[in-house]
Image: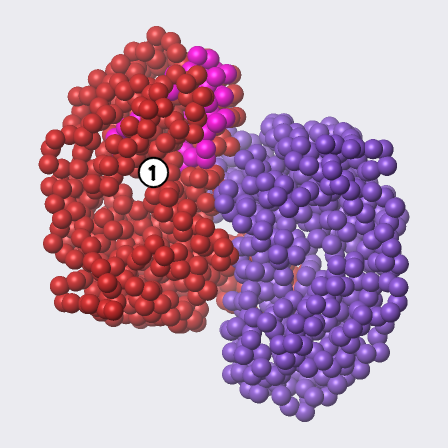
Chain colours: A red, B purple
Amino acid sequence: MSTATSTVRPVLIAGQWRDADHRDTFQATDPNSNEKLSAEFPVSTWADCDAALDAATDAARQLRRLPASKIADFMECYADRIDAAKDALSDAAFAETGLARSPRLADVELPRTSNQLRAAAAACRSGDWAGATIDTATGIRSCLSQLGPVCVFGPNNFPFAFGSVSGGDFAAAIAAGNPVIGKANSSHPETTRLFAIEAAKALEETGLPAATVQLIYRTSHADGERLVSDPRMGATGYTGSRSAGLTLKAAADKAGKPIYLELSSVNPVVITPGALAERSEDILGQFVTSALMGTGQFCTNPGVVMLLNDASTDSFVDAVKEKFASAAAGTLLSPAVAKSLSSSVQKLCEYGAELLTGGGDIESGRCAYANTLLKVSGKTFLENPEGFQTEAFGNASLFVVAESIDELCQAIEQLEGNLTGCIYSATDGSDDEACDKIAFELEPKVGRILNDKMPTGVAVSAAMNHGGPYPATGHPGFTAVGVPGSLVRFGKLTSFDNIRPNRLPQLLQDKNPTGTTWRLIDGDWTQNKVG
Amino acid sequence: MSTATSTVRPVLIAGQWRDADHRDTFQATDPNSNEKLSAEFPVSTWADCDAALDAATDAARQLRRLPASKIADFMECYADRIDAAKDALSDAAFAETGLARSPRLADVELPRTSNQLRAAAAACRSGDWAGATIDTATGIRSCLSQLGPVCVFGPNNFPFAFGSVSGGDFAAAIAAGNPVIGKANSSHPETTRLFAIEAAKALEETGLPAATVQLIYRTSHADGERLVSDPRMGATGYTGSRSAGLTLKAAADKAGKPIYLELSSVNPVVITPGALAERSEDILGQFVTSALMGTGQFCTNPGVVMLLNDASTDSFVDAVKEKFASAAAGTLLSPAVAKSLSSSVQKLCEYGAELLTGGGDIESGRCAYANTLLKVSGKTFLENPEGFQTEAFGNASLFVVAESIDELCQAIEQLEGNLTGCIYSATDGSDDEACDKIAFELEPKVGRILNDKMPTGVAVSAAMNHGGPYPATGHPGFTAVGVPGSLVRFGKLTSFDNIRPNRLPQLLQDKNPTGTTWRLIDGDWTQNKVG
């Protein structure tokens, strides 16, 4: 039974901001006060999901008949609107996440978000992402195109840049020609609503189907599973906790529906004695900044640092400990994050990690936890590698101190899939042999391998892989960030075999549709027309 | 307990032809006599799988250190050996599958197989498949590379071209730098063994790790599930029955291991009255050839034909019926195929399809079933679309006769994912409007759409998509045939971020590794070096 009232925020379905069909409501929490914010949001029933799926199906049919440039127009218009709404968006996100209005929200994440939309729009306009392939000898031509409605579950830690109706998955899905049903992250529903308002206006302004972007805030777990596995669904993008992600994955997998997941990652960083001998101060600064930035709440936060047992490591660990102890503990995104961090640190201690500093809540009236540093020997790590890879999402890191390169490599061999892996080594090449050995073990475990650089900071680049082997993500061949790679996930491959020229999609006709689209014609990449 | 004896065929593990660890054995059947062939093959226990996984892991480590050209050398050497072993391979496959020695096995499938290996070798040598991407502004470079050991389950219907240690998945996995554990199809184990003998010799000749290619013949279902989900496994390629495929998929999905499946497809063919008015004789010939070729045992066999109810359709159906009735029924691959075909036809009749001809076993002493034609109205089809999409693998087709274009489009809307979909229409364009409507519905349902051409015959082309939405395959973005697309499935994406130049893989160094490799440098595809 629906109990929609005017005090509960409306959902956006089929172009209408309307009362949700809901039984329950929820409120976000201001992590700076630990108090609930006043706005109430509906927990939609299946009726809302069903209506959104129907509307998305219809929008998908309409989008297929539109030129890519129309979709790009929308994305660019939306990007401009996001820039213009900077203050309101930053205020809302600050209230819901505690992330600093400036520079973080207004000056870093917001321009990243609008520029990401513009980059995806450019890819959409160019058609390069579709990998158009023409084989004149056989008369077969192929490209990627619309897959169908995409559901995006955004994470708690990037209310803009990974947001359900504003972030990377959203931009990629739309640019590939798909309508999106956004499922707001429950910790920042108001922020997500403000984005959807701008998106809806941009859709209207640019004449796209109104149901190209829809928004619901929350569903039951069962309805979430039903949503990602519904026959009308094309694919799902999910960034968030491992347990919820795996439940959705199981449902989507069973229905044969692609689901792209970004789950968890401890992002190992190896620092050799050679590197410490050369520039321990520099590395110390880099590490502490990377580890505590955003209160450590990045997917690519350096959660596990691997070192060799020697005097330089001892000094380094002591220095990090001091920095962690003296730095103010940032605000965490939500009570749930604080609770989960506390539970993870407790587990790591139970497994035998030594607590060097932190390890407790801060009595501050806000969501916060002391900057926490833990240490374990390589030997102990190897006795319970799974346990010591428990992700402590937030401002906590675990140092693993090995007795030898061999032991360190053994520890790496036990790592699960991760988004990133870093190696800091001597610049004079004196430990290159050890590094080669380490890199050989580390590379297959991670989506992005770095030298002399911390993993936080995920550039929007064609060469970026924000991905990695399971369970970092659900498939080792895809990236969630970067164009055109991120779009490819939301495309369906279709071959056109002996299709009459006038019936071919523009991308596959003899004429280059834009004059500059890259196509693989008879084995060569070219911007030329056929023939 | 192992009961290996010298009369049971050995498995190929870690470069050794050795007695299997097995409890049971099995024999293939000669479909031309319905009698068991004498050779006994082991049903391996987990111990064999475990040993193969260990050896494959070790081989993968060695392969990572080798230049791509070494792997290409092996594939080319193996291709030459296959060509040289043509007679023995064709004899073995004829005995086990009943497929004609010539032209089918020796003159069509065999050269396709060796040429497919050569095409994959060329892709491996060029590195084009890896999509090397270089972004000089951010210092990030990425490419695909080895994913890890791949298990290949080959189907019954292409003992060479889709064989576990010779076919498309095998070639793609090896060219992407992965060792392969082949699981022979139980209907042609001897043929697979002969291929593995040639592969092992080619490995030795070209100096590749002996465990790059391994072979087991059969396992328990539980061990098969364990194999595809083992932590040491990189990915699995499976072509075969839907039920077995879905069981493996569930296991692999749960472990987060990619599995590429080709399951089932009825390959709808739409023929408009306009096409029949113009050239019904021609289309009749094309259809009957495509439907009965190889006794209809192709993944892309035209199993469902959609027509409009008018006089030209009546004549066409009558003509097909006559051709089906008068053509000799071919031999089916195995007793299991005959049984499954009979059961599918029975189901279609139970659902309400009219049996126009065939529909029974042939008393021939061989595996055979009468050429079978069934018919159902569009209305009846729409009452049970799932039932009427029961795949009747073999020499049977179902005609769906709709009352209108709208009804025909409704029927298409109810189709599951398919490998292919064809539209035959008037060449003078008189029914183009109807065709556009049909194509709009059909395209999202299929991996390859064709005009005026039957779906059988899968060209090895860069533009080929031998794939399609679930349940035709497990992922709508990938093809199992064609280079470089098929290789991409078996690659892991890795970004190299700020990696020192001397530590970059060859493909990503400033210098173009071959002089001609296509790389995406700062947004443009080029064969140039960086800078």
Residue B292 occupies quadrant: bottom right
Q: Residue at x 23, y 25 (%)?
A: A359
Task: Tell me the quarter of the image containing the N terminus of chain A.
Answer: bottom left
Residue closest to the eye, A221 or B321: A221
- A412 inside magenta stretch: yes
Relative height, residue B508 to residue B439 (above, below): above
Taking A263 as reference, is A343 left or right?
left
Relative height, residue A82 to residue B374 (above, below): above
Chain holding disc 1: A
- In this view, the residue farthest toward the bottom is B311
Q: Residue at x 29, y 11 (%)?
A: A315
What type is the residue that disc 1 sits on? Cys
Task: Tell me the quarter of the image containing the C terminus of chain A.
Answer: bottom right
Residue closest to the eye, B278 or A53: A53
Residue A23 coordinates in the image, percent (x, y):
23, 63
Q: Which residues are magenta?
A: A394-423
Label 1: how many residues lie within 10 Å, few (<14), some (14-19) or many (20+)? many
Q: Residue at x 74, y 63 (%)?
A: B339
Residue A146 coordinates in the image, percent (x, y):
46, 62
Taking B328 as reference, is A109 left or right?
left
Residue A296 coordinates in the image, percent (x, y):
27, 33
Q: Residue at x 78, y 59 (%)?
A: B335
- Identify the residue position indicated by label 1 in the image: A299
The secondary structure type at the circle numbered 1 is loop
